[in-house]
């Protein structure tokens, strides 16, 4: 009986094995009892043997039962430890979201796709011809200074704007052209409103001479800005770009103070948001186009995103700041 209690107390299969050897093995009391049978009288023999067998069966059964119990315990423990808890993450609640830059980019691209513009892309590593020369930025133009550009060997550079995609498209296709070029651009700047890598969306519309006017340009940019920012006034200011003539910078009425004057608009009531103009004849010369005309525009995606989402420091878009990003879910 005492042995049955010992079996029931065991807590591992190893310990049970040891106990089994002790209780039923060669040196166990039962084995020795069987060995001693030959010295017993025939009358006692049957009785003792029956008792030894009863004990042996009792112990064997108790050990088998304990073994089954321990094995079940082990399986239960294992399956608890190794189980895949499919409820562990609330996948929907923790899902990611579009980065504000992608979100603004998508919205811009969507608008122009809906206006029949086609998406074009070009390499980030450009040559001087596509990035500068063909865009009427000759060798000694100030915008080509080392400070304004990441140069590499062999006259290669990281493109400083998306305008080279205009050139690549015009060189490989015949007019009419109606394209946008979204993508990354690079300039060695770093402050509240600049990062060395940022994104632009370029636009270009070309058709036969006289078919596209400045009024068309003005209309589409006003319509775009109203669809992007809401109902704010838009104004065109004369400006200069080497690749457009005439050129304009486009302002939207300050979305923070509605034109009253604040820190964001530097008390002017206006926010500068993009550059544009009618394509300069020198650009057409560079790509071998004749008797055509059209407009081009370019906008900074981070600039538009920081204004629309009211993000104070443009650089924070690249900090992986979860507190900022989670607001865009
Ligand atoms: N490429 C100009 C820039 O990066 C923007 C622009 C594009 C201006 C097309 C006019 C026309 O500043």
Image (cartoon, rainbow, N blue to C red):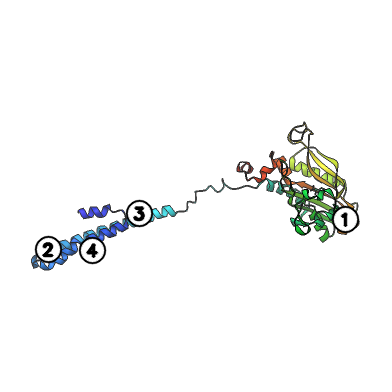
Q: CA distance from mark 1 to mark 4?
A: 102 Å
Q: Earlier in the sequence, mark 2 or mark 3?
A: 2
Instruction: From the viewer's side, name the closer residue of 266 and 97.
Output: 266
Q: Nearer the viewer, mark 3 or mark 4?
A: 4
Categorize mark 2 by other alpha carbons within 10 Å: few (<14), some (14-19), many (20+): few
Q: Which mark is residue 25?
A: 4
Which label belongs to residue 284?
Answer: 1
Which residue bears the numbered disc 3?
73
Q: Is residue 82 visible?
A: yes
Labels 1 and 4: the sequence-earlier one: 4
Q: Quick one: 250 or 119, which is closer to the camera?
A: 250
Q: Alpha-carbon distance for marks 1 and 3?
A: 82 Å
Image coordinates for residue 121, horizontal then vertical, percent: 75, 56
Kindly report the distance in space between the C-alpha atoms of the residues bearing marks 2 and 3. Answer: 39 Å
Q: With 316 as the anchor, is 277 left or right in this view?
A: right
Local secondary structure at mark 3: helix
Looking at the image, residue 260 sits to the left or right of residue 63; the answer is right
Between discs 3 and 4, the one toward the N terminus: 4
What's the distance in space between the residues labelled 1 and 2, CA to CA?
119 Å
Task: Give the alpha-carbon distance from disc 4 to disc 2, as whole Å.
Answer: 22 Å
Left or right: 92 with respect to 297? left
Whole-percent x and y of residue 116? 78, 52
Q: Residue placed at 23% from the left, 52% from the top?
A: 5
Q: Position of residue 81 (x, y in %)?
A: 42, 53
> Which residue is at 80% across, 56% downward?
128
- Write the residue at 74% across / 33% down: 263
> Mark 2 — residue?
47
């Amino acid at each position: 009986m005492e042995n049955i209690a010992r079996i029931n107390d065991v807590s591992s299969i190893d310990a049970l094995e040891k106990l089994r050897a002790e209780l039923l093995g060669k040196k166990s009391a039962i084995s020795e009892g069987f060995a001693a049978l030959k010295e017993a009288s025939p009358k006692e023999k049957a009785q003792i043997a029956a008792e030894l067998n009863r004990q042996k069966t009792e112990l064997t059964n108790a050990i088998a039962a304990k073994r089954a119990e321990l094995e079940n315990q082990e399986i239960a423990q294992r399956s608890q430890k190794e189980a895949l808890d499919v409820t562990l993450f609330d996948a929907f609640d923790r899902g990611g979201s579009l980065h504000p830059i992608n979100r603004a980019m998508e919205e811009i691209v969507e608008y122009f796709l809906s206006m029949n513009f086609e998406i074009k892309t070009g390499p980030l590593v450009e040559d001087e011809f596509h990035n500068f020369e063909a865009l009427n930025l000759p060798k000694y133009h100030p915008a080509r200074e080392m400070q304004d550009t990441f140069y590499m060997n062999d006259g290669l550079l990281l493109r400083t704007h998306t305008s080279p995609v205009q050139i690549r498209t015009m060189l490989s296709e015949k007019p009419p052209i109606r394209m946008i070029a979204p993508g990354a651009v690079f300039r060695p700047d770093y402050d509240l409103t600049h990062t060395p890598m940022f994104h632009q969306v370029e636009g270009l519309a070309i058709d036969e001479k006289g078919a596209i006017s400045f009024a068309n340009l003005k209309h589409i940019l006003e319509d775009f800005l109203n669809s992007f920012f809401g109902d704010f006034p838009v104004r065109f200011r004369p400006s200069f770009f080497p690749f457009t003539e005439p050129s304009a910078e486009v302002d939207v009425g300050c979305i923070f103070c509605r034109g009253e004057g604040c820190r964001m608009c530097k008390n002017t009531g206006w926010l500068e948001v993009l550059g544009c103009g009618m394509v300069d004849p020198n650009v057409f010369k560079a790509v071998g186009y004749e008797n055509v005309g059209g407009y081009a525009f370019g906008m900074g995606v981070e600039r538009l995103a920081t204004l629309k989402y009211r993000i104070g420091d443009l650089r924070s878009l690249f900090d992986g700041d979860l507190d900022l990003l989670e607001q865009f879910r």
